Amino acid sequence: MRVIPLCVMFGGWLSMPALAADAEAWMNRFVAAEDSQSYAGTFIYERNGSFSTHTVWQAAEGEHTRQRLLQLDGPPSEVLLVDGDIRCASAQLAAQMPSGQAWSDKALDVAALSQWYDFHLIGDSRVAGRPAEALVVRPKDQHRYGFELHLDQESALPLKSLLLGESGQLLERLQYTQFSLGSVDPQQLQPGPSCEPVKAIDEQSGKVAWHSDWLPPGFRLLDSNVRSSPASGEPVSWLSYGDGLARLSVFLEPLHGAAVADARNQMGPTVAVSKRLTTTDGDVMVTVVGEVPLGTAERIALSMRAGTDQEGK
C-alpha cells in the first residue's frame, strides 16, 4: 500500500493558525499528564515489520511514579521503572525498549520544541474504544523524524504513536488495544523472576576529550562520560545529544591498529553508523546510534573532533 505523506494528506488543515495553537495546547496537556496519572493497558508495538504485544501498569502518587512493562510474546520479559529510572529488566526487553514508552524521559519543553517542530491538529480519533485527539509533530528540517500522536481526550495520555520518516513512511508504531484510567492493583506492579537488577555502567572519571563540529539546529550536549568496552576493556568515550525530543549517542573507541570497516545500518527508526577517523594519537572508531535519519548520523560521525565540547554538559 502506498504511504501518502501527512503533509500532503492534511495540507489544507495544516495552514490554519487556530489549529496550530490548539495543537500546542494539547501538547502542553500531554506533557503535564504523562507522569501524573495512574493507568493500565495493553498495546501493540511494531518496528521494522515485526510486532510484539505488551501490558503496562503505572501508579502515580504525588511526584512519584512506578511503572511495570511486561512483554506478552515469547519468554516472560519485563522492565520496572521507579520515577523514570530502570530498577530491573529482563535482558531481552531492556535492549529494545519501545521509544513510545520513553516520551516521559524527555522532559519535553513545548515552547522550545516549537523552534524545530510544527504542531498541528488533524481531527478526532478513536483508539482502544476511547475518543482521542489526533495531532502531527512535524520537523522543520530533514535532520529529525516526525510523529503522529493520538491523545486520549480525557487524560491527554498517548493511546497511539506513529514515528514517521522523511517521506511520511511509517517507521514505528505503538498502539493501545485496551486502556483504563485509575488506580492500579499493587500486585501488578511487582516484578517477576525474569526482572534482574540493572547493574551500573562502569564509568571512569575525567571529561570526554571529544566534541562535534556540527550538530542539527537545536541539538545540544546532554551528557558524557568514559566507559570500559565490554568487548575489549578499552576506554570508550560516550556523548549524548538531543533536541528535547530526538536523541542520539556517540561512542568513540581507540582501534590500536585493529582492522575495522565502516558500517551503516537501520532497523525501523534506529540507525547505527560507524566511521573510522584518523587522529594524531591513532585511529578511532566513531559510532553514532539514535533515532535520526541516516544522513544526519553520518554527518555527525564525520564531524567528531578531539577536544572538550565547548557547551559542556
Image (cartoon, helix red, strand yellow):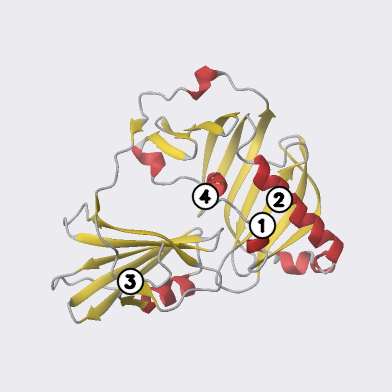
How far is the residue under mark 4 from the one under mark 2?
Answer: 20 Å
Upstream in sequence: badge 4 or badge 1: 4
The residue pinned by badge 1 equals 110
The residue pinned by badge 4 equals 99
In this picture, is 133 found above or below 207? Answer: above
In this picture, is 116 found above or below 152? Answer: below
For the point 52% across and 32% down, the residue is 67
Upstream in sequence: badge 1 or badge 2: 2
Residue 162, position in %: x, y?
Answer: 63, 53
How far is the residue under mark 3 from the one under mark 1?
Answer: 30 Å
How far is the residue under mark 1 from the one under mark 2?
Answer: 6 Å
Q: Camera-side residue: 275 or 110?
A: 110
Upstream in sequence: badge 4 or badge 3: 4
Secondary structure of the residue carrying numbered label 2? helix
* Pointer 1 with pointer 2, Cβ within 8 A: yes
How far is the residue under mark 3 from the one under mark 2?
Answer: 35 Å
Secondary structure of the residue carrying numbered label 3? loop
Residue 1 in sight from this viewpoint: no
Numbered marks: total? 4
* Residue type, label 4: Ser
Q: Which quarter of the rendered picture does the N terminus lie within?
A: bottom right
Camera-side mark, 3 or 1: 3
Residue 170, position in %: x, y?
Answer: 60, 58
Upstream in sequence: badge 3 or badge 1: 1
Q: Which image quarter: residue 183?
A: top right
* Pointer 4 with pointer 2, Cβ within 8 A: no
How far is the residue under mark 4 from the one under mark 3?
Answer: 30 Å
Q: Can you tell which mark lies on residue 28?
A: 2
* Residue type, label 2: Asn
Q: Can you tell which mark lies on residue 308?
A: 3
